[in-house]
Amino acid sequence: MENTNSYEHIEYAENDAVARIFLNRPEKRNALSMKMSDELISAFEHVQGSESIKLLVIRGAGGHFCAGDDISEMPLWGDANSVMRRVRRYQAMANLLEELDKITIAAVDGYAVGGGLEITMACDFVVATERAKWGMPEVDVGITPGWGGTTRMARLIGRRMTKEINLLGALHPAQRARELMLWNRVVPNDALDAAVDQLIDVLLTKNHQAMRQLKYIINRGVECDLYTAQGFEALSGALSASVNGAWEVSDADKGLGVAGFAEKSELWKTRRKAAKNFWTG
């Protein structure tokens, strides 16, 4: 595995098509410091810019996934406007993770609470150990979640359960996350590495153009009405046909419109002449 780590609070490494991020503040149960969040944004942007990376695995060092935002740093966030700016930055970080055109896996051991749970909700797959614990305990600190603990959660498990999780602030066993369909699989405590590797092996056999399309239309479709979502499905079907070889459509101009603009061809001149002053009076 090539270690390309140039960070302080995370470790980043690549091995062929698989990138791995380790949240690396074990003395703080990998709580999300401001620096760690900035480093995660940098790493996510690097992953997004890569055409060779197909999968991203996120896990925590030292027996825990992530204990959430570093509460001890919150006084440093500043006034109410600065807090809002910080929260919006964290929302952008979660959105960036969710919208990566790679398949993402959260490998969870120990605590995944608050911001740690919010990271898992932005991933495509979550595999956890039996001893993992999760929840949104912000209410007992007198604050509210900022980047998924109410919004993504409600879309994943519904408003009633989201209220229960957030208003009570309890810490739940991993199996309950599986039952609520918040996480995918719960495995024995000593089987997390093997389970993640098996999932990676299966995912690497796939057609990754199809995977990118599926992720995109599922993420977009769940946020809109049925007919709009079906439009994404239809367009994805056409794109699949195109990249699989059936790209020639008899009444498409096969790129001649773009080339014609650059060359000022007769096709471009004819189209512009017909349209330029049409119904402008």
Image (spheres, rainbow, N blue to C red):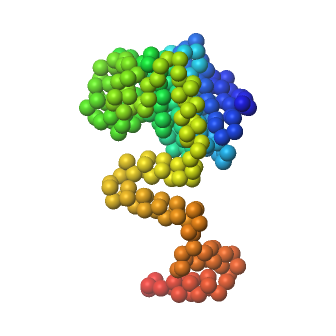
> Which percent across, then down, holds residue 63?
54, 15
> Which percent across, then down, holds residue 137?
38, 19
**Could you tell me which residue is drawn at 43 percent across and 48 percent down?**
218
Query: From this viewpoint, is residue 45 visible?
Result: no
Query: From this viewpoint, is residue 265 visible?
Result: yes
Residue 154 position by quadrant = top left
Q: How many marks?
A: 0
**Could you tell me which residue is drawn at 48 percent across and 47 percent down?**
215
Is 59 placed left or right of 131 in the picture? right
**Could you tell me which residue is drawn at 67 percent across and 83 percent down?**
265
> Which percent across, then down, holds residue 240?
52, 60
**Could you tell me which residue is drawn at 33 percent across and 59 percent down?**
227
25 or 210, nearer to the observer: 210
- Please identify the quadrant where the N terminus is shown: top right
Q: Is residue 53 above or below residue 138?
A: below
Is 165 placed left or right of 71 in the picture? left
Residue 47 position by quadrant = top right
Q: Which residue reaches farthest left?
A: 160
- Please identify the quadrant where the C terminus is shown: bottom left
> Which percent across, then down, holds residue 22?
61, 25
